[in-house]
Image (tube, rainbow, N blue to C red):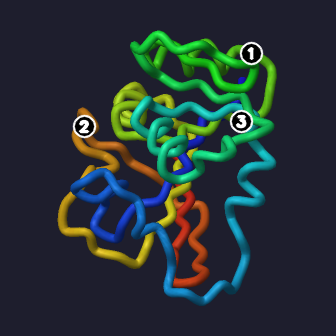
Amino acid sequence: MRKVVLYIAMSLDGYIADSSGGVGWLSGQGEETGEDGYTHFIQQVDTVILGWNTYHQIVTELSPEQWVYQGLTSYVLTHRAMPSTPSIRFVAEEPCSLVERLRRQPGKDIWICGGSGVIQPLIRAGLIEEYIISVIPTLLGSGLHLFGETGGEVKLKLLQAKSSNGIVELRYIPR
């Protein structure tokens, strides 16, 4: 079966968005050196799952001119009636049932992109098989927490830690 991977960035104090939902803080120290983890990661996936808020932020703020996940099949979890395209599918499905269905289909890894309403049920159900978290050198003080209530303890095993431009990328699997 396909591997389900959470690949996301968070502030040093554990937030994925500031108190107004913004992500303008997602940058390093300004030194563009070292290996780009995203370039390697994106070659391993062919499917991305995201919630409506993440999708809406991408198409209205971050990249309104071009869909950033071109070449991937994107599933946007929403209850809004939206017309799907061959590469962007709007589905009114629970995150866990969607992931379980997609895992049985042939393909590369499945990327869980965000937000927390998608991520948290998958953590509680034990469906995330790898966590790749980039820690941004910023303290936000408030905002939207990445993990929130996990429903209990989740033990992880560190596979790799690397840093570039002040950003620390941590790679874990459940243990």
Residue reaching furthest left?
142
Give residue 34's quadrant in the image. Answer: bottom right
Q: Vertical placement of 88 versus 5: above or below?
A: above
The Cα atoms of the two marked residues, 1 and 3, are separated by 11 Å
Would you name the residue on which mark 2 appears? Answer: 152
Residue 10 versus residue 67: which sits nearer the camera?
Answer: 67
Residue 175 appears in the rendering: no
Q: Mark 3 points at which residue?
A: 109
- Name which residue type carries label 1: Gln
Q: In this view, does 142 lie above or below 151?
A: below
Task: Name the residue type under label 2.
Answer: Gly
Depicted 6 relative to depicted 62: above or below: above
Can residue 60 be seen from the camera position used here?
yes
Q: Which of 127 and 43 is in front in this view?
A: 43
Among the 4 quarters of the image, the one containing residue 121 = top left
Q: Which quarter shows the N terminus?
A: top right
Secondary element at image label 2: loop
Residue at image point 41% right, 40% down: 115
